[in-house]
């Protein structure tokens, strides 16, 4: 085993510390668990408990989404991604904290939508092969899909087996709905978003140049499409239909959205 300095082992040339979860991420996990317990027990203002539960859970999922991108990129050949701090799950290391953390949380509170955020920078030149590039982009949305299924299963099994306060399950249902919307939004073939980045390596040179031209404006294009009544209606119709198919009660995540706006109560 190689060492960077006395007592500091290396993993493929990278200090092992680059792989340890950061205190910031661990604090978010602790807040998620504690606020879930508070919402379950009705401690204090239950609306604020659900607010903390949903927001901290959403931030944890954002960290894991970006970690999935980073760890697949690392395995695919981008070793420098570890030095940039992305494998520590620290959201403060992200390239665009405003777009990656603040904006998604604001959109959750105002619109109840799981907005994707561009956070980690990947050195694409260090990754050989088009398939590997696609897998790097797919890793984040795949994490959201997995979270969606896990949360829906926990909701359907847990609410029936354990009962408990409706406020807790409403918060969990809202988290599942946010993961569902994030899954679908991230898979849209829009330049600059994960869905677009999945197909970009397979485009010919001319289409790739056009893609790269529009990629910096992917968020603006996404908002413009969702703002269009017809396109937005199609998208959210698909979200609601898929939620129904998964057994996610619409009234329950609607209650969760109402609860997290504690300032209105």
Image: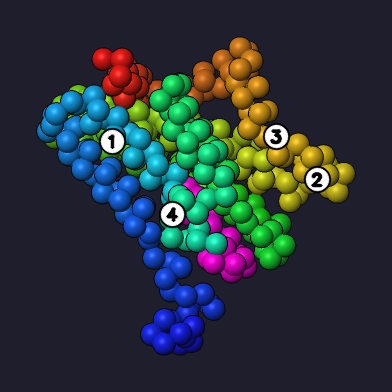
Q: Which residue is mark 4?
A: 90
Residue 259: image location, x then y, percent = 28, 21
Q: Indicate which disc, 3 or 1, sits on the residue closer to the N terminus.
A: 1
Query: Residue sitting at 63 percent across and 32 percent down?
Result: 219
Residue 122 visible within the image: yes
In the structure shown, which secondary structural element does the residue marked by tag 4 occupy?
loop
Pointer 1 or 4: first along the chain: 1
Extreme residue toward the top, this view: 229
- Residue ID for mark 2: 208
Q: Is residue 213 left or right of residue 151?
A: right
- The residue wearing badge 1 is 53
Q: As drawn, is 169 to the left or to the right of 238?
A: left
Frontmost of labels 3 and 2 is 3
Which mark sits nearer the N-terminus, 4 or 3? 4
In magenta segment, residue 74: yes
Which numbered tag is attached to residue 217?
A: 3
| Magenta span | 65-83
């Amino acid at each position: 085993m190689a060492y960077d300095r006395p007592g500091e082992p290396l993993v493929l040339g990278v200090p092992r510390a680059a792989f340890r979860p950061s205190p910031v991420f661990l604090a978010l996990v602790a807040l998620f668990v504690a606020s879930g317990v508070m919402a379950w027990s009705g401690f204090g203002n239950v609306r604020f408990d659900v607010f903390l539960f949903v927001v901290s859970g959403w931030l944890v999922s954002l960290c894991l989404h970006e970690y999935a991108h980073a760890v697949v990129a690392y395995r695919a050949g981008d070793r420098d991604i570890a030095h940039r701090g992305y494998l520590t799950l620290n959201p403060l290391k992200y390239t665009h904290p405003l777009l990656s953390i603040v904006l998604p949380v604001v959109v959750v509170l105002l619109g109840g939508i799981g907005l994707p955020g561009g956070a980690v920078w990947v050195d694409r030149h260090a990754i050989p092969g088009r398939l590997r590039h696609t897998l790097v982009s797919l890793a984040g949305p795949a994490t959201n899909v997995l979270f969606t299924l896990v949360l829906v299963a926990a909701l359907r099994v847990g609410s029936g087996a354990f009962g408990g306060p409706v406020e807790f399950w409403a918060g969990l249902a809202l988290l599942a709905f946010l993961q569902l919307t994030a899954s679908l939004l991230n898979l849209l073939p829009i330049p600059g978003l994960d869905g677009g980045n999945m197909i970009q390596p397979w485009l010919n040179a001319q289409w790739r140049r056009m893609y790269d031209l529009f990629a910096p404006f992917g968020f603006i294009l996404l908002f413009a499409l969702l703002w269009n009544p017809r396109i937005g209606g199609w998208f959210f119709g698909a979200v609601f239909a898929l939620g129904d198919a998964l057994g996610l009660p619409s009234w329950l995540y609607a209650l969760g959205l109402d609860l997290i706006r504690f300032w209105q109560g």
